[in-house]
Image (spheres, rainbow, N blue to C red):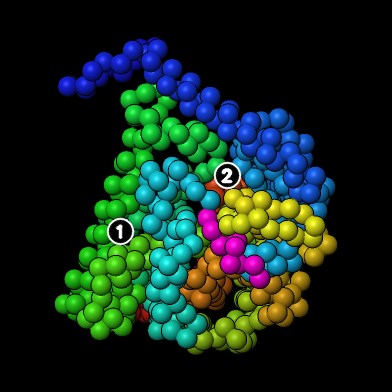
Amino acid sequence: MQAPHPTPGQPGVPFSTSYAALAVAVVMLLVSLLVHELSAYSKRRSMPPGPFRWPLIGNALQVPQVHPWLTCSRWARVYGDIFYLDALGQHIVVINSATVARELLDRRSSIYSGRPHLIMAGDLAGYDRTLIILPYGDEFRQQRRLISQTLSISTIGQYHNIQEAAARRLVLGVIDDSSPLEGQIKMNIASIIMLVTYGYTVKSTEDVFVERAIKVMENFTLAEMPGTWLVDMIPQLKYFPSWMPGLTFHKTAKAWRKLLYTTSRTLYQWSKEHSNNGTAHLPNLCASVLANADGKATLQLEESLMWVALAVLSGGLDTNISTILSFILAMLHYPDVQKKAQAEIDAVVGSERLPQISDRPSLPYIRSLIAEVYRWLPAGPLGAPHALDEDDVYDGYFLPKGSIIIPNVWYMLHDPNIYPEPDVFKPERYGGSDIEMKKVTDIAFGFGRRACPGFYFAEGTIFSIVMTVLATCDIMPIVDDHGQEIIPDIKYPTKAVLCPEDVKCIFRPRSEKAKSALIHSTTSIL
């Protein structure tokens, strides 16, 4: 192996010097770990229980890269509602109970609303300006306030026609198109969010804005993946030059940062210009915020709005795609549930029109079905991590400042003491009670000041797609060459967002009348 050639004008650096510099970083890490080990020794007895920790490295090698929420759930059955991990000196507290999560993350949100400092995703790739990992403070509050102005329960109704039209176009598309299902769903979810956020109408499956937005989302998923980047484990490496062996993350982060900033600014400028000249769809989030400013929008407000719009787009893409694919997978595995849901829609809506979001109060089984999708395969099985801003004590346990707090959403929604037969998809378990359904959504959409601010928007999007699919189509398994049905396995890659893969099926129109209604309805604004 040879050292990389220096660029013109750059002096050559011996390979041994490169390794010496890397060795210095490793020594610095070991020293910091030793200091941490000594300072934490006296406090360990009062910390929550947890698996055995090795000296210096703690539990760093015990949490697998594949489906870590399942390992955490096994530990939850051993150590209870709250347990402690140590990863190379980083305190990690895993919460396995909704009761504990509400006490700490909701009621004590003033000290539990921070985010862990992510070197790769934040400092280097630039996502620290986006709401999902933005530190708690004035800018964070400003961005959430901008979202609530346009996507709150009192204002979201103005976008229902967009959500309904996009849902109908999606269903019509999967009937007539044999292209991969995930791509169809991704395109239509993006269409809804971009129209609502920017007033931008997606007209092609190869739309450059959509492709960039999806890439920005995918890059973030890779950037924040725990255990992937050496610089997240040895932060000092971010100061080392990119030509050193093993430090290619600098080049990767630079490319991701450029795409992130270019995409966010280009989309915002498009929305601002076209909303002003009347060629963007109105209302949209960007235009509404600027209109509320009444011509007095500051540069700071516009900068915040630019990042808010991108957060709504990128944050809504992967979670909504995951939920819809999980719904389809559930219908393939539980056809009796599908029939029962269709019967409710037929009884309430009839066959003379397509269902609307305004029908939601009259469709308790559909509401239960959607809640069960959130519970059965939650999009975020390990909730977004919080950071503890100061020392705290809970139930006699000492929780040190700087701890990463991880809500184990998977276990909260699969605890057999609360949800018997948790792996079974069973909407009847809620008894039609919205109170019981809300317990699920309160967990699935996050806690405290970090809860998803776009909940009502996501709720309308998911409801419109689910009810439109069930009203007009039967979701059927594909068949092999011998006529045998192929039910897709329940499998998903290890990512921050749990998204079923290889979901293949047939959308068969329930009647020609239903298909005609879809065709007629897609002549709307989309």
Residue 510, visible in the rendered structure: no
10 Å neighbourhood of mark 2: few (<14), some, or many (≥20)? Answer: some
Q: Amino acid at mark 2?
A: Thr
Observer able to see residue 402: yes
Between 37 and 410, the residue placed more toward the observer is: 37
| Tag 2 residue | 494
Residue 240 x/y as whole percent: 38, 30
Q: What x and y, as percent, mark residue 395?
A: 79, 60
Residue at horizontal 34%, vertical 44%?
Answer: 256
CA gap between label 2 and label 1 equals 27 Å
Observer-nearest of 467 and 6: 6
Residue 398 is inside the magenta segment: no
Dot 2 or dot 1, earlier in sequence: 1
Identified at 47% across, 58% down, the residue is 135
Please give the label number shown on residue 264.
1
Q: Which residues are magenta?
A: 107-115
Residue at 43 percent of width and 75 percent of height: 145
The residue at 40%/12% (across/down) is 16
Front position in the image: 328 or 214: 214
Q: Is residue 245 above or below residue 514?
A: above
Question: What crowding class fits label 1: few (fewer than 14 Cα within 10 Å), some (14-19), or many (20 or more)?
Answer: many
**What predominant SS class does the magenta segment belong to?**
loop
